[in-house]
Image (cartoon, helix red, strand yellow):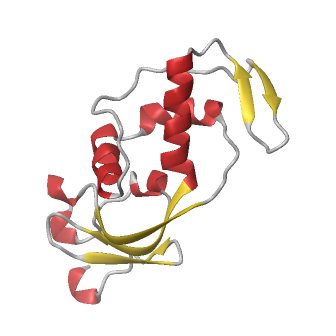
Amino acid sequence: MKLLTANFISCAVKACKSSSLSFPLHFKDAELASKSVPYNPLLLSNLLPRLDWPALVTSSKELGFTLPDTKPELPRLSATAAATTTSDGDMNMDSGVGEEDEKTLRMLHKVLMETEVVEGKMVCGSCGFEYGIHQTVGNFLLPSHLV
């Protein structure tokens, strides 16, 4: 499961719907893998406004990554900006993005797109229910007594 996916998931237990502790789910016993994905700064700049930044920082820390406490203010890249693709599939944008912004985008790419939780659990902070992750797929089916 990619960290990007985890940023949109909360506990499905009915009693947790109104609790702020049900999001984000917390990683436990996580086994990580890195999978090479072509770098796409346009995708990242469009995803950034949709991310719950405090939840992403929390999840990242649990997995051993360090992100800034405040969401970076990056310029929105335009699809019409001149783009070139490298031999390994990475997209380079001629967008006028500064060196620091480029560094931040690459760090976000590594955390959100290339890092996967292969095995482990995600635990609700409200009820303590554990959702298993096996071969990068989360099991979010609940037993009938919790639905």
Give the answer, above or below, for where 23 lies relative to 49.
Answer: below
Give the answer, above or below, for where 38 lies relative to 14.
Answer: above
Tell me which corner region of the image, top left, top right, bottom left or bottom right, holds residue 44. top right
Figure quadrant of the C terminus? bottom left
Along the line of sight, the residue nearer the viewer: 139 or 66:
66
Along the line of sight, the residue nearer the viewer: 106 or 71:
106
Q: In the current view of this chain or complex, which residue is farthest to the bottom?
A: 144
Give the answer, above or below, for where 31 lies relative to 87.
Answer: below
Q: In the current view of this chain or complex, which residue is farthest to the top?
A: 96
Tell me the residue at 17%/73% (across/down): 128
Q: In the current view of this chain or complex, which residue is farthest to the right?
A: 87
Position of 88 with respect to 36 (left or right) is right
Tell me the residue at 78%/24% (across/down): 83
Q: How many marks?
A: 0
Mark yes or no: residue 18 visible. no
Position of 37 with respect to 125 (left or right) is right
Along the line of sight, the residue nearer the viewer: 80 or 87:
87
Tell me the residue at 79%/43% (across/down): 89
Mark yes or no: residue 74 visible. yes
Residue 42: give x, y in percent of width and height. 64, 30
Tell me the residue at 35%/46% (across/down): 56
Residue 106: give x, y in percent of width and height. 56, 35
Residue 125: give x, y in percent of width and height. 17, 63
Position of 6 with respect to 116 (left or right) is left
